Image (cartoon, rainbow, N blue to C red):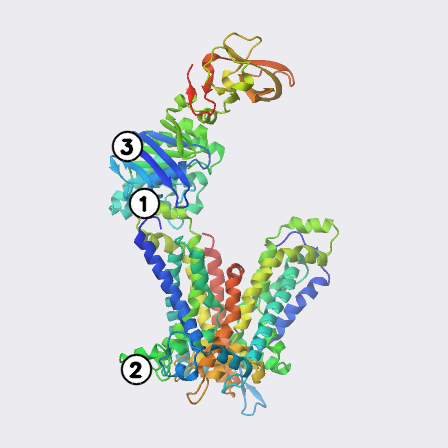
């Protein structure tokens, strides 16, 4: 995949590349290797000297129950957000695909939440469900349900999930709609003539043909939950109550805030890096192959 | 097995566009009907209305005596072969053909028999495990037909199935489709814009133009006796030479009816003559171009008021460019129409 | 839908309208809240129609902030704008140059350079926050626009996008340019750049929104209130130990924070969609 006609460059290409390479090196590779290096060190209490301790930081971390809790929280969070936002988005996309009048307007109205910052989305939903002044909080409590995301871990999680799903629906909707519109109409008509009703067509024809898109979105949604939800969590629950909404990324942030254990925080960063690399590799490998349908 | 009857079928789109303006058509059981016409004449729309993919604004469509206007495509017991085949990309060839049967609740072993029989007839038995993207254009076309024939429907519908194939394959497939239909004896409606395909495949040929039927009949009848100037120029290749009577009255034989407006004569009915014979159409032309294709020669000539006239002569006889020739046709070979071309005038 | 059943069309409209209602509801509430006074908003039973305090709330917030965070939102808006524009423009600049180099030149280590850049896609800033923070701090870029912008333009999305785009440009254009005596810079300026305008615009839209909505990074590196962006400023308004957070003002701020990116998405929808789809390939 290279151009056959090019310029022969002496200095110019390096000059062109210099800015990006410089920034990438300073703000990416250097910190990344620092993190890796630090994960093998332990600093003393005053930060004056450090000691190479091999994988000890790693084993320490992997013995902390809070770490596993953060992993579990991240996993639960990812699954919920992915499942909910994908299915709701698919529902909307399948209706919008129907050549209705004003479909363009519906599309515009459904995709703009993408532009809202996660933190703001969080704040908006917090406002709706705030235990003391939330508009929907009152009916909940009146009907006997003791709604309190400030104290109840599950409630906090629910609130954060709501905000995350709300934001993510628009992105998924866009891609699902594009995927649906890429299916040739004649294939659907052929299926109809072959005796398949709308529901059967959806499950036997449309959904399988949509699977590359679905898989791609699945990976993107999981990555989204890992990283982009930081704003929501910080704005709404601060990771609480009692770590109920602390994801792996949030934990890195929170632990580092408290200062002190640079090595431990570096380890968390490194583990996160490994997970993300794995996820994005899967995405590139698998999606590239499946994309030619 | 069923007949197909269309009575005063009309279709108007919500914006007010009249796509089909009142069509009457009767296709007997087991007959092969071809709808042919230029782009936009409504032939595909009509086919889709028979399939149930488009609604019918008024008139009735009857399959096997049953009015199907309000019946969904799935329940009309029809099968359709699409222009781009519309195979299910994610299913194997076997499953593509089995899909329709499974949807109707047929037993697995029965399905297997039917699919294998169809595969044998179409010679695609070796391809059953492959996916559509692994097949060539011609192979995909056969699978599309296989999908249609396993259903053993009342009517086959074909929507320009050969347009996407190269010329050679098109000819081969044309013959196969005809043989297949004769063998299965299923009533078929076939849409094409290619008049050659239309002539060679049809039992009943329907020439459409602007949402209306210009003429229905056997292909050879349409060739011999076109009822409108549109059909006259559409059927037959190379196309008929058409003239305005006012321009060539000198060349015309005497004693023609007074309301003749348009005169047509086929290139193959013109012969090069030395003299003018009484009672013939006789044109004196200057030769503009010659095309020799071996078995015959096309001579293009013109004179004032005639436009480009084509004469088709067998063999390699080729007059010199710029020379004057006389092209004549007997009265019996002339096609006469009123000035608007809508009515044929018999001699 | 192939079948013509009117009630399914009705259901489709219903579902879509319901969807829009869900999507719009939180923002609608925020708008309403921003038009009432503190007491109405706080009592847990806020009416669903606008109140009369809109101008008052917005003016107050823009010029002097809330009682929790005394920072004028007007200042925060400026910070957000500079930072978002900086990120978008910065990213476009460095990536179009790099993509140009990688696609149109032959030089040693070309492939290596590309991979070095490509790998940055794997790791968003959230994964390397503290070490990057240290670097920024060492370079004395805390509390500066530079510090906010630079680390975020390091990723490869732009480079990949431009590379993909350049690959679709026919070779004949370059050949014709060379025959016309154009050098690399002229080709870039006269041919490539004009052709890239829509791609640049699409990328700008996506990156502007991305930059505007940044949370973690600005949070970390700004210590001075005056450098806050509007997105993190909101959180400060709500962090209180007692319950006198002024929600109506926070909601006004939220509305202001949403306006620019949402406006961009709605008015440049086609570019936005294109940018999204292209960058995810």
Tell me the quarter of the picture where residue B27 sits.
top left
Q: Identify the disc placed on residue A232.
A: none
Q: Position of residue C191 (x, y in %)?
A: 67, 54
Q: Which of the numbered marks, if any, corresponds to residue B3?
A: 3
Q: CA distance from mark 3 to mark 2?
A: 70 Å
User: From where the camera sits, is residue A230 visible?
Assistant: no
Is residue C95 in sight in this rendering?
Answer: yes
Image vertical order of residue B334 relative to residue A221, above or below: above
Between disc 1 and disc 2, whose residue precedes? 2
Q: Chain of mark 1?
A: A
- Residue A38 screen position, x and y as percent: 55, 81
Q: In the structure shown, which secondary structural element does the residue marked by tag 1 occupy?
A: loop
Which residue is tagged 2?
A146
Mark identifier at residue A194: 1
Farthest right residue?
A: C181
Dot 1 surroundings within 10 Å: few (below 14), some, or many (20 or more)? many
Callout 3–callout 2 Cβ contact below 8 Å: no
Q: Is residue C278 above or below residue A67?
A: above
- Which residue shows up at 47% across the image and 80% down it? C250
Closer-to-camera residue (B307/C161): B307
- In three-dimensional space, the C-alpha distance between marks 1 and 3, rounded to whole angstroms, equals 21 Å
């Amino acid at each position: 995949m290279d151009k056959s006609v090019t310029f022969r460059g002496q200095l110019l290409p390096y000059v062109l590349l210099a800015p990006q390479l410089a920034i990438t090196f300073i703000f990416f590779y250097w910190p990344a290797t620092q993190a890796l290096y630090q994960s093998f060190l332990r600093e003393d209490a005053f930060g004056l000297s450090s000691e190479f301790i091999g994988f000890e930081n790693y084993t320490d971390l992997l013995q902390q129950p809070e770490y596993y809790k953060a992993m579990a929280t991240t996993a639960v969070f990812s699954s919920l957000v992915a499942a909910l936002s994908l299915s709701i988005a698919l529902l909307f996309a399948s209706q919008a695909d129907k050549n209705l009048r004003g479909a363009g307007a519906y599309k515009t109205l459904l995709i703009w939440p993408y532009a809202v910052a996660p933190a703001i989305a969080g704040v908006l939903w917090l406002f709706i469900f705030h235990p003391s002044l939330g508009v929907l909080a009152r009916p909940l409590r009146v009907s006997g349900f003791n709604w309190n995301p400030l104290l109840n871990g599950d409630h906090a999680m629910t609130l954060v999930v709501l905000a995350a799903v709300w934001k993510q629906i628009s992105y998924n909707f866009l891609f699902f709609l594009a995927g649906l519109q890429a299916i040739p109409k004649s294939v659907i008509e052929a299926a109809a003539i072959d005796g398949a009703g709308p529901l059967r067509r959806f499950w036997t024809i449309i959904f399988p043909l949509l699977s590359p898109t679905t898989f791609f979105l699945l990976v993107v949604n999981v990555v989204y939950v890992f990283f982009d939800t930081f704003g929501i969590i910080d704005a709404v629950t601060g990771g609480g109550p009692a770590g109920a909404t602390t994801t792996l990324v949030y934990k890195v942030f929170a632990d580092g805030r408290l200062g002190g254990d640079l090595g431990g925080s570096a380890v968390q960063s490194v583990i996160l890096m490994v997970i993300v690399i794995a996820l994005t590799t899967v995405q590139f490998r698998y999606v590239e192959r499946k994309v030619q349908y | 097995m069923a007949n197909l009857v269309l009575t005063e079928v009309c279709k108007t789109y919500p914006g007010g566009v009249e796509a089909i303006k009142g069509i009457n058509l009767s296709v007997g059981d087991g007959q092969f009907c071809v709808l042919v016409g230029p782009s936009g004449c409504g032939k595909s729309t009509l086919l889709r209305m028979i399939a149930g993919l488009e609604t019918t604004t008024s008139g009735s469509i009857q399959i096997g005596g049953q009015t199907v206007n309000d019946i969904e495509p799935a329940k009309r017991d029809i099968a359709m072969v699409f222009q781009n085949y519309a195979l299910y990309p994610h299913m194997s060839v076997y499953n593509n053909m089995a899909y329709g049967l499974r949807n109707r609740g047929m037993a697995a072993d029965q399905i297997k028999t039917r699919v294998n029989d169809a595969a044998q007839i179409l010679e695609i038995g070796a391809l059953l495990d492959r996916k559509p993207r692994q097949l060539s254009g011609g192979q995909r076309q056969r699978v599309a037909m296989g999908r249609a024939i396993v259903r053993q429907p009342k009517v086959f519908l074909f929507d320009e199935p050969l347009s996407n194939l190269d010329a050679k394959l098109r000819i081969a497939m044309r013959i196969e489709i005809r043989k297949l239909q004769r063998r299965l004896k299923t009533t078929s409606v076939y849409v094409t814009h290619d008049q050659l395909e239309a002539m060679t495949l049809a039992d009943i040929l329907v020439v459409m133009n602007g949402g209306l039927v210009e003429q229905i009949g056997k292909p050879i009848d349409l060739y011999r006796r076109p009822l409108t100037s549109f059909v006259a120029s559409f059927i037959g290749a190379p196309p008929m030479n058409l003239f305005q009577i006012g321009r060539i009255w000198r060349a015309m034989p005497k004693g023609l009816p007074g309301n003749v407006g348009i005169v047509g004569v086929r290139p193959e009915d013109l012969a090069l003559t030395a003299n003018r014979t009484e009672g013939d159409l006789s044109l004196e032309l200057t030769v503009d171009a010659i095309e020799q294709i071996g078995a015959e020669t096309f001579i293009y000539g013109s004179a004032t008021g005639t436009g480009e006239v084509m004469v088709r002569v067998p063999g390699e006889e080729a007059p010199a460019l710029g020379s004057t020739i006389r092209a004549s046709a007997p009265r019996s070979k002339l096609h006469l129409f009123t000035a608007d071309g809508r009515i044929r005038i018999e001699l | 839908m192939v079948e013509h059943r009117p009630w399914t069309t009705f259901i489709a409209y219903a579902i879509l309208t319901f969807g829009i209602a869900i999507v719009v509801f939180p923002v609608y509430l925020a708008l309403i809240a921003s038009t009432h006074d503190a007491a109405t908003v706080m009592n847990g039973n806020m009416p669903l129609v606008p109140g009369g305090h809109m101008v008052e709330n917005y003016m107050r917030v823009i010029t002097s902030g809330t009682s929790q965070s005394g920072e004028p939102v007007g200042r925060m808006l400026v910070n957000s704008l500079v930072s978002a524009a900086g990120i978008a423009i910065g990213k476009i600049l460095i990536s179009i140059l790099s993509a140009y180099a990688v696609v149109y030149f032959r030089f040693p280590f070309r492939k290596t350079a590309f991979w070095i850049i490509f790998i940055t896609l794997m790791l968003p800033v959230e994964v390397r926050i503290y070490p990057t923070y240290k670097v920024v701090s060492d370079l004395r870029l805390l509390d500066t626009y530079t510090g906010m912008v630079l680390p975020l333009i390091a990723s490869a999305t732009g480079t990949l996008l431009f590379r993909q785009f350049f690959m679709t440009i026919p070779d004949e254009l370059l050949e014709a340019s060379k025959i016309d005596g154009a050098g690399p810079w002229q080709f870039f300026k006269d041919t490539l750049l004009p052709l890239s305008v829509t791609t640049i615009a699409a990328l700008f839209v996506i990156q502007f929104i991305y930059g505007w909505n940044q949370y973690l990074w600005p949070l970390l590196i700004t210590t001075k209130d005056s450098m806050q962006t509007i997105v993190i400023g909101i959180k400060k308004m709500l962090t209180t130990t007692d319950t006198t957070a002024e929600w109506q003002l926070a909601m006004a701020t939220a509305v202001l924070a949403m306006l620019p990116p949402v406006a961009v998405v709605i008015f440049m929808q086609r570019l936005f969609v294109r940018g999204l789809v292209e960058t995810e390939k």
